Amino acid sequence: MSDRFPPTEFEDINEAVGEEWEAETTPHERIRRVISHTYTPVSAETVAKYARTAPKTARKHLNALAEEGFVSTETGTNGGTVYRRSPESLVVEQAADILAHVSTDELVTRISEMREQLNTYRAEYDVDSLEELTVSQANQTLAESTAEQQEIDAETIQTWQTTRRNLAFANAALSIANAERFVDGDRHSAGGSISA
């Protein structure tokens, strides 16, 4: 016979963390956090569930975030409004992160390197885009061409897609850096005053 006591009931760790998060944040902060990782449209009720708040509260904050441009809205299949993170806010966030970690000169160099890598892929596979390559290979397969097809491996496809995405974010960051430079230049040249 064992003199051990039975184990006490374990706490649900997810519930404990959720309660702590709820106690330390406002509904607006939780809703913003949930929607910041939501890339497919969802209802206010779904956001409310994950943000640990009421659907009415979630809807109010989601609409405010939509007015700010952080959230995109559309009509769902049942006619109600659905919400997701706006692509524009994601691009601006990514661009700001790049600018916080990379100098403008280094960014220009990286953009040049990524463009060169994409040009190398285009030349190697004799297409202008990854989509064109996919269509070309499908057409060759359907035609049962005896001509040798140049196969592209999954790793190259992934690298091509990632490079193209990173180039888009880097270009956005460079555009923002240039715009900020002009805004700062205009502000300094006008002595900080706004002319009518």
Image: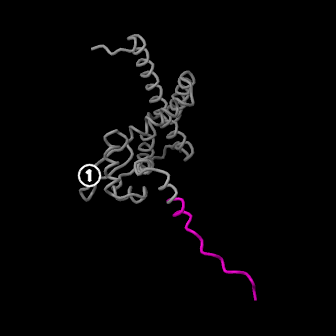
Task: Give the amino acid at mark 1.
Answer: Thr
Residue at mark 1: 75
Report the side of 99 relative to 49 (left or right). right
Position of residue 68 in the picture relative to residue 111 (left or right): left
Q: Which residues are magenta?
A: 1-18
Magenta-drawn stretch, dominant element (helix, strand or loop):
loop
Q: Is residue 76 left or right of residue 162?
A: left
- Quadrant where the N terminus is found in the figure: bottom right
Q: Which of 45 and 148 lies nearest the eye of the viewer?
A: 45
The C terminus sits in image quarter: top left
Foreground residue among 125 and 102 = 102
Whole-percent x, y for residue 143 in the image:
41, 48
Q: Which one is nearer the viewer's eye here, 1 or 23?
A: 23
Considering depth in this image, is 145 or 104 the residue closer to the camera? 104
Q: Position of residue 36 (x, y in %)?
A: 43, 46
Residue 71 lies left or right of residue 146; in this view the side is left
Q: In the image, is residue 3 part of the stretch drawn in magenta?
A: yes
Which residue lies at the image location 69% right of the left edge and 80% below the top edge? 5
Question: Is residue 126 highlighted in magenta?
Answer: no
Q: Residues within 10 Å of mark 1 (few under 14, many from 20)?
A: few
How many numbered callouts? Answer: 1
| Quarter holding residue 172 | top left
